[in-house]
Structures are given as C-alpha cells and as structure tokens.
Amino acid sequence: MHVGVLAFHGDFAEHMEILQSLGAACSEVRTLADLQTCTHLIIPGGESTVMAKFLWESGVGEKIQERVRDGSLAVYGTCAGAILVAEDVTGKNAPKSLQLIDIAVDRNAYGAQIDSFETSLQIKDSKNPISVSFIRAPKITRVGNGVEVLSSYQNDPVLVKSEKVLAGTFHPEMRNEKAIHQLFLKD
Ligand code: GLN
C-alpha cells in the first residue's frame, strides 16, 4: 500500500501529517510519475477550480480515471476533492470533474467562507462521533445506485462510498481526526 496526496494546491500537508502519524507509506503527488506507485490517493480541500486546471493540464486527471476504472487505485476526495470525484457538479464555475462516483454535488451550497462551521458527525460502524469542519463546503444533492451513505448532517449525505471511491464534503484533518483516513486505508 502506498498513499498519495494530490499536492497541486490546498491542505495536502495536513493529510500527509495524519497519514504519517498512522504509519502509512505516503508521498505528495504532482506528476504522472508520482502517481505510479500509489494504491490510494487523497484529493484534499482547497479550490476545486484550481485543482481541476492542474489535473487536466498535467494528464494526472486522465490517469486517475484510468486507474480507478481498472481497479488499481482507491480515491478519497474531501470537500473540493469531493467536487472533483463527483459525476455531476452544479453551482457557479463548476469545474470539469473526474466522474469517479455516481453523486451530484452543488458547489458552495452552504454559503460563503463566513458560513463555514464545525460540528460533530456520527460515522456508520464507528463508535464515537468525530469533530469536523465544513468550509465553503459542497452539498451532495443526488446519490446514485450502489452508493452507500456513511454519514449525514441535517439529513444531507456528507460521506459516501462506492467501491473504491470515498467522498466527504467536510474536513476531518483540521481537527486531526483520523477515523476517515483509517476507514479509507482499510480498502
Ligand atoms: N468551495 C471550494 C470549491 O468549490 C471547496 C472548499 C474546500 O475545499 N474547503 O472548490
């Protein structure tokens, strides 16, 4: 197992810290060569429009799609990363996404930066609730067949999974919560 963290932009350093504290072999991913050794990839929070530009310009985007299709790569997209893995994206300036999981997301659906908030979430099959931050988060507005909802907030799904793709609209890494990373690394 080798975990890559997409490191074009966003809060990749916090994810690297969590992975290191869990003892996982991990490295930052910016090029096709960096991606080659990875069995797992985290797409962090940040600006999905900025990350989409780098993904498509570098060829890393197409390679991620190919590796997920052939079953050799698991992906966890968080916040902007959840936008990038979604099948459909709505909202202003919606970026071209990777379409790795059959969900629709609405960008910035909770409002502006000032509407960001912290809360605790119960995750399916896990004992204790975890503390997370929603920062200009997207909302998951449609969940396709075969997509499992692992956590909800006020009746909206916020953590979903389909085969090897996990998407969460919140940041667990801001509060140093490791449960979602552990769940992701089980695959
Ligand atoms: N609103 C951002 C976007 O659409 C996501 C914010 C985040 O990742 N915290 O890209």
Image (tube, grey):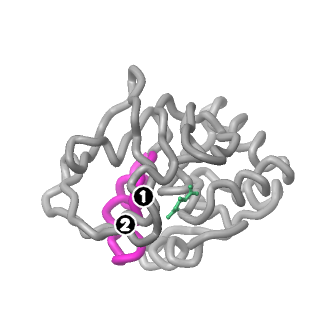
- Residue at the (40%, 45%) spot, across then down: 139
Q: Residue furthest top?
A: 145
Q: Front-most of 104 and 35?
A: 104
Badge 2 crowding class, 10 Å Cα cut-off, few under 14, some 14 to 19, many 20 or more, is few
Give the secondary structure at mark 2.
helix
Which residue, given by chain and number where applicable, does mark 2 sit on?
115
Vertical placement of residue 19 versus 41, above or below: below
Which residue, given by chain and number where applicable, does mark 1 sit on?
111
Q: Residue furthest left?
A: 127
Q: Is residue 102 magenta?
A: no
Check mark 1 vs ligand 1: CB closer than 8 Å? yes or no: no
User: What amino acid type should be assigned to the residue bearing mark 2?
Assistant: Asp
In which quadrant of this rendering is ligand 1 seen?
A: bottom right
Residue 141 in percent (x, y) is at 40, 35
Give the secondary structure at mark 1.
loop
Badge 1 crowding class, 10 Å Cα cut-off, few under 14, some 14 to 19, many 20 or more, is few
Quadrant in the rendering for residue 175: bottom left
Image quadrant in which the N terminus is located: bottom right
Q: Which residues are magenta?
A: 167-187
> Can I make out residue 1 in this image?
no
Residue 27 in percent (x, y) is at 65, 70
- Residue at the (64%, 30%) spot, across then down: 69
Residue 106 in percent (x, y) is at 48, 42
Q: Is residue 171 magenta?
A: yes
In the displayed structure, does residue 46 sit left or right of residue 131?
right
In the displayed structure, does residue 161 sit left or right of residue 6?
left
Residue 89 in percent (x, y) is at 56, 38
Vertical placement of residue 45 versus 141, above or below: below
In the displayed structure, does residue 34 sit left or right of residue 106?
right
User: What amino acid type should be assigned to the residue bearing mark 1?
Assistant: Gly
Assess whether mark 2 and mark 1 are in contact (beta carbons under 8 angstroms).
yes
